[in-house]
């Protein structure tokens, strides 16, 4: 199995607090991975660090993409290598149409393709294409637009931070279908989650606690931690995870 | 049409408009190049009386009571020479329960040293609706100085809307000065969207007096300055009557060596009136920027896209 993205010995401190501790993780090419763990485990921090967001650039360890270190690359240079991130709480853009937002990331910028990506995430393209990516969208709609922009980008690695948060039950299947679309195109998908429903969509999973990876393997194995409420980590509390699609 | 058609067509091409719209007998228009009337067409209920001045024109416009113009009236104030002064004096009286929307194109494509001065006196009668959209096309050299000013009286239950937008070219200097008085149940909306760069100077002064009960006023300015551009925004909204409602919204983006100062004044002189104020001034939002960069845009392209959204017109 070929590792496309590898994080080695990652330690990161924010405001004097150690958040990631000698974390090692590697993601296989074209697979759908889940990184699960309780609130505060450091999952979003890991995603931000892989993407190279400001405030997450100063760390120990390395991030290797296709055999090369990317830790000195700016966000957009990482994105040019087709690594991207869908935010847990995506930004709002006053006045920017969904069309222009998706087009800015799209590989195929034809209107037909932009519409297709909207339809793929379950948004009626006729209704949504010319709406703004602003506060008039609900949280769930905004998350879907974020995913559509990721689909349009046709990335090699897509980090999806809590892809189901704010999404209503009826739409969750659409989100999962969109993840399959990514996989079918060969994208390595990394879903960051603390929901069992999302974990169940993965082919391979990592369990994260207290800023480090404490176990990894097939989904059924990682899922057992949800059931046993037991995590083999040095965490002082015993984190509990949601049994269903719900939150901790 | 008694006009120099080639010039009109040329002007309209500059603003991506369809010159054939002017052939529609239901579309009133007035086309001015410097101080010459190139074209003029009136529709029933609308009276335009135009005098050529030494350095511009004076237009007296009157809309009869109960006249509702479905088609937008086109005004075009162009100035082809590289240098000169164009002064436009507009005296507008809208009768009662009437409705008019004006689209005013101001086109100075070759300006090196051009001044465009607009003095407006506008009275909107009871129950009427007046919308004025001003779209500018300037030269890329920035050799334009624009001074639009207007005094507006908005009658009972009347609506006054104005939008100022620079479509293309550099600002040069823009100094907007609008003041409106709002009677009972009237509505005032002023919108300004301008992006400056190089040594552009943008000055906006918008004042609304909510003197009638249940009157409403919203002053919105969206301004971006880059490089060495400067902007000064002064928005004043005062409410002196019960149930008057107002809102001042300033969003200003500052990049490079740009400087923005925004002075919002909100004054309430009645315990049952209410005015809110919202201002965001600074660089583009980091999360917006990083989102676009995570999709592969360069920082400059991301800033450009964010600003274009901020300055874009709302869909009607
Ligand atoms: N900028 C920051 N400064 C200090 N602590 C932070 C900062 N951002 C996150 N943290 C802390 O880091 C820990 C991990 O946060 P996060 O990565 O968001 O967790 P998760 O996504 O797993 O819920 C939390 O305890 C959080 O409070
Ligand atoms: Mg998180």
Image: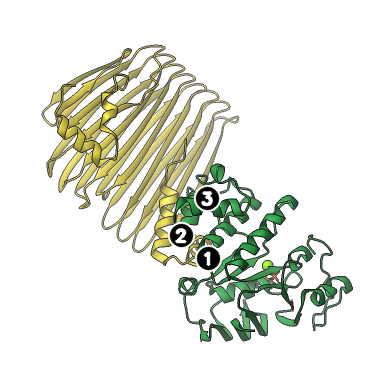
* Label 1 in the same subunit as label 2: yes
- Give A235 or B71, whichever is nearer the viewer: B71
Pointers 1 and 3 in contact (C-beta within 8 Å): no
Ligand 2 has an atom within 8 Å of the beta carbon of the residue at disc 1: no
Q: Residue at x 38, y 64 (%)?
A: B300
Q: In the rendered picture, chain A carries what hue?
A: green
Q: Is residue B269 above or below residue A232?
A: above
Q: In the rendered picture, chain B carries what hue?
A: yellow
Disc 2 is placed on an element classified as loop
Q: Earlier in the sequence, mark 1 or mark 3?
A: 3
Host chain of mark 1? A
- Quadrant of the rendered image holding ligand 2: bottom right
- Quadrant placement of the N terminus of chain B: top left
Host chain of mark 2? A
Q: Which residue is mark 1?
A: A154
Q: Which residue is mark 3?
A: A115
Host chain of mark 3? A
Mark 3 and mark 2: Cα distance apart in space? 11 Å
- Give B212 or A119, whichever is nearer the viewer: A119
Disc 2 crowd, CA 10 A, few/some/many (<14, 14-19, 20+): few
Question: Where residue B69 appears, x then y in whole percent?
Answer: 38, 19
Q: Residue at x 60, y 54 (%)?
A: A120
Q: Which residue is mark 2?
A: A108
Pointers 3 and 2 in contact (C-beta within 8 Å): no
Question: Where residue A208 appears, x then y in whole percent?
Answer: 73, 77
Q: Residue at x 43, y 38 (%)?
A: B236
Disc 1 is placed on an element classified as loop
């Amino acid at each position: 199995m070929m590792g496309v993205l590898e994080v080695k010995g990652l330690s990161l401190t924010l405001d004097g607090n150690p958040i990631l501790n000698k974390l090692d993780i590697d993601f296989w090419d074209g697979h759908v991975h889940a990184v699960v763990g309780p609130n505060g485990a450091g999952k979003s921090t890991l995603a931000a660090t892989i993407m190279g967001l400001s405030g997450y650039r100063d760390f120990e360890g390395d991030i290797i993409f296709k055999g090369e270190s990317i830790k000195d690359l700016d966000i957009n240079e990482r994105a040019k290598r087709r690594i991207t991130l869908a935010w847990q709480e995506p930004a709002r853009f006053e006045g920017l149409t969904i069309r222009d937002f998706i087009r800015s990331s799209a590989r195929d910028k034809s209107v037909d393709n932009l519409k297709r990506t909207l339809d793929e995430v379950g948004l009626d393209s006729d209704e949504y294409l010319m709406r703004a990516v602003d506060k008039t969208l609900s949280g769930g709609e905004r998350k879907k637009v974020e995913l559509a922009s990721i689909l349009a980008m046709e990335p090699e690695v897509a980090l999806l931070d809590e892809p189901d948060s704010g999404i209503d039950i009826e739409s969750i299947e659409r989100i999962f279908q969109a993840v399959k679309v990514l996989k079918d195109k060969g994208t390595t998908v990394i879903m960051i989650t603390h929901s069992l429903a999302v974990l169940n969509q993965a082919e391979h999973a990592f369990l994260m606690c207290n800023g480090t990876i404490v176990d990894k393997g097939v989904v059924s194995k990682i899922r057992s931690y949800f059931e046993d409420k037991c995590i083999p980590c040095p965490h002082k509390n015993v984190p509990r995870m949601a049994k269903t699609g719900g939150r901790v | 049409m008694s006009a120099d058609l080639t010039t009109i067509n040329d002007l309209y091409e500059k603003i991506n408009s369809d010159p054939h719209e002017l052939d529609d007998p239901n579309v009133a228009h007035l086309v001015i190049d410097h101080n010459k009337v190139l074209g003029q067409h009136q529709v029933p209920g609308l009276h335009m009386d135009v005098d050529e001045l030494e350095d511009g024109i004076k237009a007296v416009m009157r809309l009869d009571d109960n006249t509702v113009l479905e088609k937008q009236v086109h005004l075009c104030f162009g100035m082809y020479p590289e240098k000169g002064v164009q002064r436009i004096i507009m005296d507008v009286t809208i009768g009662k329960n009437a409705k008019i929307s004006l689209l005013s194109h101001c086109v100075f494509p070759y300006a090196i040293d051009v001044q465009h001065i607009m003095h407006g006196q506008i009275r909107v009668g009871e129950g009427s609706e007046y919308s004025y959209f001003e779209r500018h096309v300037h030269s890329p050299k920035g050799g334009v100085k624009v001074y639009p000013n207007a005094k507006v009286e908005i009658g009972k239950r009347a609506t006054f809307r104005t939008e100022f937008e620079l479509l293309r070219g550099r600002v040069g200097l823009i100094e907007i000065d609008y003041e409106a008085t709002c009677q009972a149940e009237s509505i005032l909306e002023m919108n300004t969207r301008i992006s400056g760069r190089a040594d552009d100077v943008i000055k906006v002064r918008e004042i609304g007096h909510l003197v009638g009960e249940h009157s409403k006023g919203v002053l919105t300015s969206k301004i971006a300055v880059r490089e060495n551009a400067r902007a000064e925004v002064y928005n004043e909204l005062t409410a002196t009557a019960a149930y008057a409602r107002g809102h001042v919204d300033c969003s200003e983006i500052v990049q490079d060596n740009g400087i923005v100062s925004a002075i919002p004044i909100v004054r309430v002189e009645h315990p049952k009136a209410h005015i809110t104020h919202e201002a965001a001034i600074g660089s583009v939002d980091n999360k917006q920027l990083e989102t676009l960069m995570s999709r592969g845009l360069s920082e400059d392209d991301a800033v450009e896209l964010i600003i274009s959204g901020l300055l874009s017109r709302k869909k009607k």
